[in-house]
Image (cartoon, helix red, strand yellow):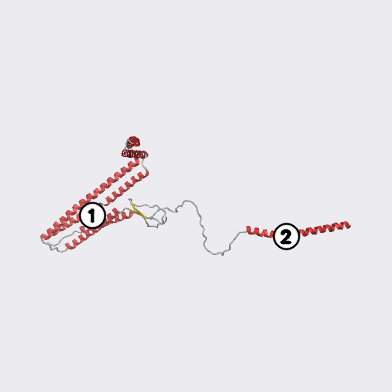
């Protein structure tokens, strides 16, 4: 029993020593583990900043690649045709409805508009003259036979001038119209030839030109090689060698041009050539339209002749009354009516010229890009 008591006491003592040793190791390793844990926490921590929340817009932009397609497309075109002299907007510019986009060459149209305005002024002057004549001839003239005869001579002279001017104007306008019609036919023929392409006869002519250019090139090349060899040997001058070189280069250029012409002839017209021929037809038709618009000048000149005839008739009536001792002249109201019609016609020509001038400007039909 005593031996067992010693064993139990020894076991308790050993257990106490082991416990003390564990407690000592635990106390000695605690700070190191704590430091390692704090260091690990610092390494894995995410830095943050604290700000105050405020109300405001959030900006966000997204970059994408693609094609921009308009919601609505509006075609832009001019009612007239001709050469564009100014462009006031480019592709991508923002324009407002009614903004001027382009302007055509309107020098001739502006001159015709001014001429039409002058025709209006002349017609109004003729109307005023007819009314003044009514006012003057409604009372006793009191002129002598000699004065009446002078007035008749002056009126007849004015009639001759008016008839000559009308004939000249009619001839000039008709000639311009005929020339414009000829230009239209020529442009249309040229367009038809461009669309049809070169004929067999034209192709043979171009092929013959290529053969001639090839022969000239071969001859110039042989002469150049001979002069070059002689020049190297000192048997030819620098001038002779330079001339042979220039002739060779010229022959080579001529051969290249002939070959290009043959290639164009075989391939047919290019889109640019076709568009140019169509543009020439449009321009010729525009010139014809402008020439035909000048027919109003013939009408105005004929009205001048009619008015001059009226003045002659009035002067002859005054002469007859002067000879008869009377001072009464009957003026026909038809003369005033004719003058009024002339004013209306001249005003219509002026309005047409202004409208045509406006059509040669391109305006934006809508607001947008």
What residue appears at the point 67 percent right and 60 percent down from the top-left corner? 35
Q: Nearer the viewer, mark 1 or mark 2?
A: 2
Q: Which quarter of the rendered picture does the N terminus lie within?
A: bottom right
- Indicate which disc residue 300 carries: 1
In this rendered view, identify the residue nearer to me: 55 or 33. Answer: 33
Q: Residue furthest right?
A: 1
Disc 1: CA contacts within 10 A as few (<14), some (14-19) or many (>=20): many
**Image mark for residue 98:** none
> Please, what secondary structure does the residue beneath circle 2 have?
helix
Residue 28, numbered label: 2
- Label count reads 2
Rendered location of residue 349, percent (x, y): 27, 55
Q: Are marks 1 and 2 in contact (CB under 8 Å)?
A: no
Q: Nearer the viewer, residue 277 or 19?
A: 19
Q: What distance separates the C-alpha of mark 1 from that of mark 2?
A: 129 Å
Q: Answer whether residue 148 is visible to the viewer in this image.
A: yes
- Picture coordinates of residue 58, whole percent (x, y): 52, 60
Q: Relative to 118, is 256 on the left or the right?
A: right
Quarter location, residue 135: bottom left
Image side of residue 295 versus residue 160, left or right: right
In the figure, 361 relative to 56: above or below?
above
Quarter of the image holding residue 7? bottom right
* Residue for point 24% across, 53% down: 297
The residue carrying pointer 2 sits among few (fewer than 14), some (14 to 19) or many (20 or more) residues within 10 Å by Cα, namely few
Q: Quadrant of residue 41?
A: bottom right
- Mark positioned earlier in the residue sequence (1 or 2): 2
Describe residue 10's horizontal placement relative to residue 332 as left or right. Answer: right
């Amino acid at each position: 029993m005593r031996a067992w008591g010693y064993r139990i006491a020894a076991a308790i003592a050993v257990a106490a020593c082991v416990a003390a040793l564990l407690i000592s190791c635990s106390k000695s390793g605690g700070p190191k583990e704590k430091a390692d844990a704090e260091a690990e926490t610092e390494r894995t921590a995410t830095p943050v900043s604290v700000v105050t929340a405020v109300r405001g817009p959030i900006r966000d932009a997204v970059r994408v690649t693609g094609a921009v397609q308009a919601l609505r497309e509006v075609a832009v075109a001019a009612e007239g045709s001709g050469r564009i002299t100014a462009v006031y907007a480019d592709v991508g510019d923002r324009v407002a409805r009614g903004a001027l986009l382009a302007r055509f060459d309107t020098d001739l149209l502006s001159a015709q508009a001014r001429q039409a305005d002058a025709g209006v002024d002349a017609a109004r002057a003729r109307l005023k003259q007819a009314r003044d004549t009514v006012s003057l001839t409604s009372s006793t003239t009191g002129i002598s036979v000699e004065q009446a005869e002078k007035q008749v001579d002056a009126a007849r002279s004015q009639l001759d001038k008016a008839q000559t001017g009308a004939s000249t104007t009619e001839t000039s306008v008709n000639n311009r119209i005929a020339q414009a019609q000829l230009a239209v036919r020529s442009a249309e023929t040229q367009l038809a030839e461009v669309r049809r392409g070169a004929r067999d006869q034209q192709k043979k002519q171009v092929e013959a030109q290529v053969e001639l250019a090839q022969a000239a090139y071969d001859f110039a090349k042989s002469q150049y090689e001979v002069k070059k060899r002689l020049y190297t040997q000192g048997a030819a001058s620098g001038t002779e060698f330079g001339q042979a070189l220039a002739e060779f280069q010229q022959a080579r250029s001529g051969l290249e041009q002939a070959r290009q012409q043959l290639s164009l002839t075989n391939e047919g017209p290019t889109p640019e050539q076709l568009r140019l021929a169509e543009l020439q037809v449009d321009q010729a038709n525009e010139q014809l339209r402008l020439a035909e618009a000048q027919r109003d000048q013939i009408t105005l000149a004929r009205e001048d002749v009619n008015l001059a005839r009226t003045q002659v008739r009035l002067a002859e009536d005054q002469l007859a009354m002067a000879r008869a001792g009377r001072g009464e002249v009957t003026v026909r109201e038809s003369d005033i009516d004719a003058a009024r019609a002339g004013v209306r016609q001249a005003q219509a020509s002026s309005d047409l010229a202004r409208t045509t001038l406006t059509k040669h400007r391109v305006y934006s039909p809508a607001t947008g890009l």
